[in-house]
């Protein structure tokens, strides 16, 4: 017969504690990037949050709720697979001059890690649908409504994005949500308005092209005027030269004759050709 194994009282105590820990779990393990809020059956939400690591709690009175405090991205999109809500979830709103637009954007944010217990007590775990989503949609409409359609369509888009980011950062901070960045990914207009914009751009391009043609023609006219003025001045100078020295006419005649002519007789005077001097 095998001898019976006798456990010492200390060993028995350790075994009992181990079994009780497995059954009642008097501890909580907080993973990396998360915080835990403790709800006590007697005192309610405790005014603290537990950081990463292992923490001992009262298994009979305490319940732990976990929150992710790492950066998150909430997207609103018309593409069914891209946004948090399936289907066309884009924000439809009006510009200052009444043009309808459709906005797609993403908000990067994280929870205030020092105020998780307040968030849990005042808002709860569904803070996205209760706070984040309605605030984003509301303030996007306000930001768009401050500008007319032509400004929204142009570089003012960055100004709208900056204004919206500042608004959300201030508003959501009261709900313990920290806004890191707002990305306005797309602003779409109605087909009729987009066609009008395209036609306007085409008209502007045609006007610029016509302006270029007119400027070119004007420059050509100026060139011809300057050329004519130069020729007139040259004729005047030639006339003055002929009046003072009639032999200038003979010299010009000699310059224009055939290159093989050696000399020219003019009024009984032999005039050598300029070309003969080089031979």
Image (spheres, rainbow, N blue to C red):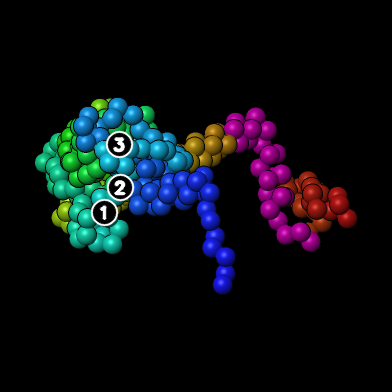
Q: In the picture shown, does residue 35 fall above or below 261?
A: above
Residue 103: x and y in percent read: 23, 48
Q: Circle 2 sits in a helix, a strand or a loop, which is it?
A: strand
Q: Circle 1 sits in a helix, a strand or a loop, which is it?
A: loop
Q: Which mark is residue 38?
A: 3
Contact between marks 2 and 3 (CB within 8 A): the answer is: no
Q: Is residue 66 magenta?
A: no
Magenta segment, which residues?
A: 237-260
Contact between marks 2 and 1 (CB within 8 A): the answer is: yes
Q: Circle 3 sits in a helix, a strand or a loop, which is it?
A: strand
Q: Is residue 101 left or right of residue 157?
A: left
Residue 40: x and y in percent read: 25, 35
* Residues at marks 2 and 1, CA–CA distance in whole angstroms: 7 Å
Q: Is residue 266 left or right of residue 65?
A: right
Question: Crowdedness of circle 3 by 10 Å Cα count: few (<14), some, many (20+)?
Answer: many
Contact between marks 1 and 3 (CB within 8 A): the answer is: no
Q: Which mark is residue 217?
A: none
| Image depth: mark 1 or mark 3 in front | 3
Give the mark count: 3
Residue 199: x and y in percent read: 23, 53
Question: Crowdedness of circle 1 by 10 Å Cα count: few (<14), some, many (20+)?
Answer: some
User: Which residue is labeled 1 in the image?
Assistant: 84
User: Which residue is labeled 2 in the image?
Assistant: 74
Query: Which of marks 1 and 2 precedes in the sequence?
Result: 2
**Residue found 19% across the figure and 48% down from its top:** 91
Q: What is the magenta segment's predominant secondary structure?
A: helix
């Amino acid at each position: 017969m095998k001898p019976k194994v006798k456990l010492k009282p200390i060993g028995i105590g350790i075994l009992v504690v181990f079994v009780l820990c497995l059954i009642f779990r008097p501890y909580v393990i907080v993973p990396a990037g998360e915080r835990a809020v403790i709800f006590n059956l007697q005192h309610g939400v405790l005014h603290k949050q537990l950081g990463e690591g292992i923490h001992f709690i009262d298994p009979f009175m305490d319940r732990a709720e976990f929150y992710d405090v790492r950066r998150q991205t909430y997207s609103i999109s018309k593409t069914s697979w891209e946004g948090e809500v399936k289907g066309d979830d884009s924000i439809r709103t009006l510009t200052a001059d009444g043009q309808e637009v459709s906005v797609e954007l993403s908000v990067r944010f994280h929870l205030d890690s020092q105020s998780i217990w307040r968030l849990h007590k005042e808002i709860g775990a569904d803070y996205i649908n209760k706070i984040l989503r309605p605030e984003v949609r509301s303030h996007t409409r306000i930001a768009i409504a401050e500008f007319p359609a032509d400004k929204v369509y142009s570089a003012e888009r960055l100004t709208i994005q900056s204004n919206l980011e500042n608004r959300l950062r201030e508003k959501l901070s009261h709900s313990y949500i920290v806004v890191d960045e707002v990305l306005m990914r797309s602003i779409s207009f109605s087909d009729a308005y987009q066609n009008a914009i395209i036609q306007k751009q085409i008209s502007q391009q045609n006007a610029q092209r016509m302006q270029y043609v007119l400027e070119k023609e004007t420059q050509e006219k100026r060139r011809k005027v300057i050329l004519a003025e130069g020729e007139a001045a040259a004729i005047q100078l030639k006339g003055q030269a002929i009046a003072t020295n009639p032999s200038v006419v003979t010299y010009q005649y000699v310059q224009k004759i055939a290159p093989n002519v050696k000399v020219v007789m003019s009024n009984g005077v032999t005039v050598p050709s300029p070309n003969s001097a080089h031979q």
